[in-house]
Amino acid sequence: MPLLAIETTCDETAAAVITRQRTVLGSVVASQEALHARWRGVVPEVAARAHVERILPVIDEAVDRSGVHRSELEVVAVAVRPGLVGSLLVGLAAAKGIALGLGLPLVGYDHLAAHLYACRLAHGPRVRYPALGLVVSGGHTALYRVGTPTDLERLGGTIDDAVGEAFDKAAALLGLGYPGGPWIERTARDGNPRSVRLPRPLAADRDRIDMSFSGLKTALRVRVRPPGTPADQPPPTGQARADLAAAFEQAAVDTVVAKVEVALERTGLRQVLVGGGVAANSRLRAALTEAGGRHGAEVLVPPPSLCTDNAAMGAIAWEHVERGDVGGALLDVAPGTDRSAARRAR
Ligand code: KG4
Ligand code: ZN
């Protein structure tokens, strides 16, 4: 009997139907990219209202695609933290309504743990705990000791912007579209990452697992628009833009990889689970695999469709069900707020 997972933490409205064996029968993601592109960042109020419009059709579509009748559902699961509070509340309200209406238990799960659980969906029993977890998304960038799928101990992470947020800002500076990650990746393919030297703040500090991306973003801004540049000067194009995109991407990747290496040395862990939208980036995937090799560690990354926000990773809710950790979400959900997405929109 399958589980219905609902995910509305940021700007994707998603639902999936997943069996106890962790087979995804149906998964639907309605992106709000077009709505937020104008502002080059997620506008929380716009996101919440779009979730209200989409949540029921998305759930219906996921259940239809799964071939399961709603009377066959066994559990309703919903991502309850962290995220934009207005967005979280829409998913939670829908999940509560369906659980109450169908008389099913409700399980709340953590969105970041779910990003890492996408590795379990993609790689099955190859995933072994404890592992080192790396979440690289638009709102979060952090390393964890993952004791069990649902037990994450934060070892360090960004002290300012999330790496995905930096990709989004860099794309905006270069006159590229939103979300910035895929645009930077495509544009960087024709560029030379060594043509421009950009900083890697904190990357060389072996005593800290912390990362920083705001200085990199500022350095790119100064390269693109040196002081005194007329306000109406258009962003660079052609080879100059490709070189800047490649140099930015390489600096961001180097920063993340350096801290993964410090964390591997410090913890002695031999497997790295990677999740979040930026894990879709091929330069990062290749660099992480190479770095893992240097430390005798296996690096597991989900396919790109399971890196960006989705509800299939809500399969993690089965871990809660199997532990009997069910129902609390009805009573004590306190959705965490996430200011970084709001900051990105500014
Ligand atoms: O995990 P996600 O879908 O949403 C959050 O939980 O934040 O991550 C979205 C972020 C955006 O900042 C987007 O620009 C970035 O992931 N991203 C990428 C790529 N695809 C998405 N960054 C770099 N390269 C990509 N291919
Ligand atoms: Zn996410």
Image (spheres, rainbow, N blue to C red):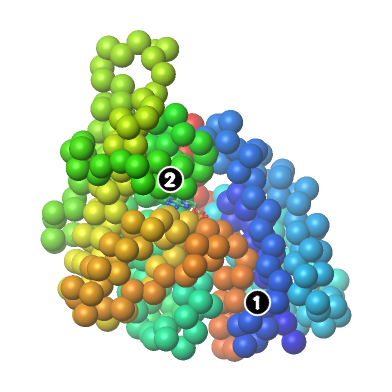
Q: Nearer the viewer, residue 159 or 301?
A: 301
User: Residue at position x 35%, y 83% from top?
Assistant: 130
N-term-proximal mark, 1 vs 2: 1
Q: Position of residue 264 (x, y in %)?
A: 22, 73
Residue 87 visible, this angle: no
Q: Position of residue 228 (x, y in %)?
A: 27, 12
Identify residue for label 2.
186
Quadrant hosting residue 306: bottom right
**CB of mark 2 near ligand 1 (< 8 Å):** no
Q: Is residue 152 left or right of residue 100?
A: left
Quadrant hosting residue 287: bottom left
Is the residue 151 above or below the residue 98 in the image? below
Element marked by disc 2: helix
User: Residue at position x 46%, y 34% from top?
Assistant: 176
Q: Position of residue 203 (x, y in %)?
A: 19, 53
Q: Nearer the viewer, residue 234 or 27?
A: 234
Mark 2 neighbour class, 10 Å CA radius: few under 14, some 14 to 19, many 20 or more: some
**CB of mark 1 near ligand 2 (< 8 Å):** no
Any mark on residue 206, and which? none
Q: Is residue 340 left or right of residue 189?
A: right
Q: Is residue 125 left or right of residue 57?
A: left
- Quadrant including the N terminus: bottom right
Element marked by disc 1: strand
Q: In the image, what residue type sits under mark 2?
A: Arg
Q: Nearer the viewer, residue 28 or 201?
A: 28
User: Residue at position x 25%, y 72% from top?
Assistant: 292
Any mark on residue 24, and which? 1
User: Residue at position x 21%, y 60% from top?
Assistant: 258
Is the residue 336 above or below the residue 73 in the image? above
Q: In the image, what residue type sits under mark 1?
A: Val
What is the CA distance from the residue labelled 1 to the residue labelled 2? 30 Å
Tag count in the figure?
Answer: 2
